[in-house]
Amino acid sequence: MRPRCVITGIGAVSAAGIGIEQTWDSLCSGRSGIAPISAFDATTSPHPFGGEAKKEDQLVSARDYVPKHYRKATKVMARDTELAVVAASLAAADAGLVTREAGEDAALTYPSSRVGCHIGAGFIAAETEELTSALVTAKDDKGDFSLEKWGEVGIGNLQPLWLLKYLPNMLACHVTIIHGCEGPSNTITCSEASGLLSLGESVRIIERGDATACFSGGIENKTNPMGVTRMGMLGRFAELDGGIDEPWRHVRPYDDSVCGGVPGEGGGIVVLEEKSAAEARGARVYAEVAGIGSAQSQPGALGICHEVSTCGGPGGDADEGLADAIEAALRDAKIGPDDIDAIVPAAMCVSTLDRAELGGLERVFGARLPEIPLVTLTPFVGQLFSGAGAFAMAVGAKAVSEQQLPARLHGGWPEARAGAGASESVDAELMNVLVCTGSLSGQAAAVVLRRAD
């Protein structure tokens, strides 16, 4: 029999809270973290709201979560990397895992060579001040930007480690250095599916005996000028008036009357362990990873939508890639569709994507789909992109552990999915919870989380 893998620690970082307990309290209380963006002046933007990860009304900082000797390194961390470092530290503490973070002389839970790290990342946006301070030095005699001057002078005014700061693998790089993860490590850049695909890689590595534990998940930040602009132009974000109250009411999954959500930052990193090793050290288990699956959706299913008036039209085909990924995860878990007790979907609040997602779910679950509770998270935290699947996984594992479904926020009543409207948190018998997502890049991934024995 192949080794079994369990989640023993959760590091969740988002607008819903810092840490899984604060996050869970917000979700169960129906408290959204979407608010005016504070990281930059977004008051003149058509997308002035977002979900920022804050601690005591300040953007959370990695400086508060790294060993004292490592604080200097936070200066060369992009925001995405900082959030990953915070999430990994929270996950290790939650799991009771002693890593190199505790000091060179600490008695480690596992040898460093037996600890891996797989973190999904996205397109890391350069900080505006860093980039523009160099760009302004590349003007020609007329005062216009000159590529020639940029090559001669401007590029030399970027900070020496500028490129290293924005490489996607820097998230896993800093986490592995801090925690001494010397086992298999990788970075997956598949947008929303990144976190679940990273978990899948961690599972297979533990199953084949190359690691005993892994940090696994995904993080991304889109509450920055470049992220807001790029994804706004792609039609992923709704255009909203900055003066409205309760902006979460305009983030409505499966509602064809709106198109687009709001940007968010964060995601989740979990500690995944081989089950017998976790039991031997008396670790608390949130859930077992019973099945994983992945597939590819048809090209072009990106959910591009530039006008609300076009979003309510006839939907496209079902997301067959998502359905294939779910079916693969069910086979891996040796269960059928009737065994799933709840679903944590992407629910991206982009009608073209939402309709395709519903079509994929209906292909697997058929007429039973309206009876299966959905856990929709975007109205709480915004769109997390490469952090989305990982955050959903973290919440799903907590739901299985608590045998409880969090509240569901919704400012309207969707026609496409009866039962996806607002609801309070309720107790539920959860043996198998499905977490699944498509992605901007076309990959689809699914994970079955099972209640611990």
Image (cartoon, grey):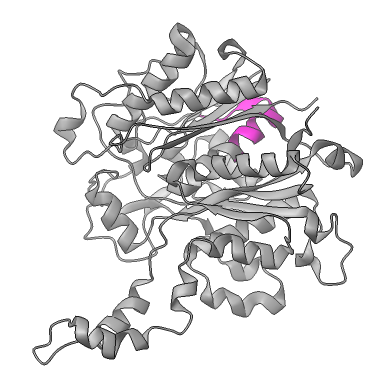
Question: Any magenta on residue 400?
Answer: yes
In the depicted view, which residue is nearer to us: 133 or 318?
318
When the figure is inspected, residue 271 is found, relative to residue 40, above or below; the finding is above
Quadrant showing the N terminus: top right
By secondary structure, the bulk of the magenta-drawn segment is best described as: helix
- Residue 378 vs residue 92: left or right? left
Splitting the image into 4 quarters, where does residue 226 fall?
Answer: bottom left
Quadrant showing the C terminus: top right
The residue drawn where x is 73% and y is 61% is 182
* Residue 82 position within the rendered picture, expressed as x and y whole percent measured from the top left: 55, 64
Whether residue 246 is visible to the viewer of this picture, yes or no, is no
Q: Residue furthest top?
A: 367
The residue drawn where x is 62% and y is 13% is 339
- Residue 432 vs residue 414: left or right? right
Give the magenta range. Answer: 394-407
Whether residue 110 is visible to the viewer of this picture, yes or no, is yes
In the depicted view, which residue is nearer to us: 383 or 180?
180
* Residue 105 position within the rendered picture, expressed as x and y whole percent measured from the top left: 88, 71
Splitting the image into 4 quarters, where does residue 450 fall?
Answer: top right
The residue drawn where x is 80% and y is 66% is 102
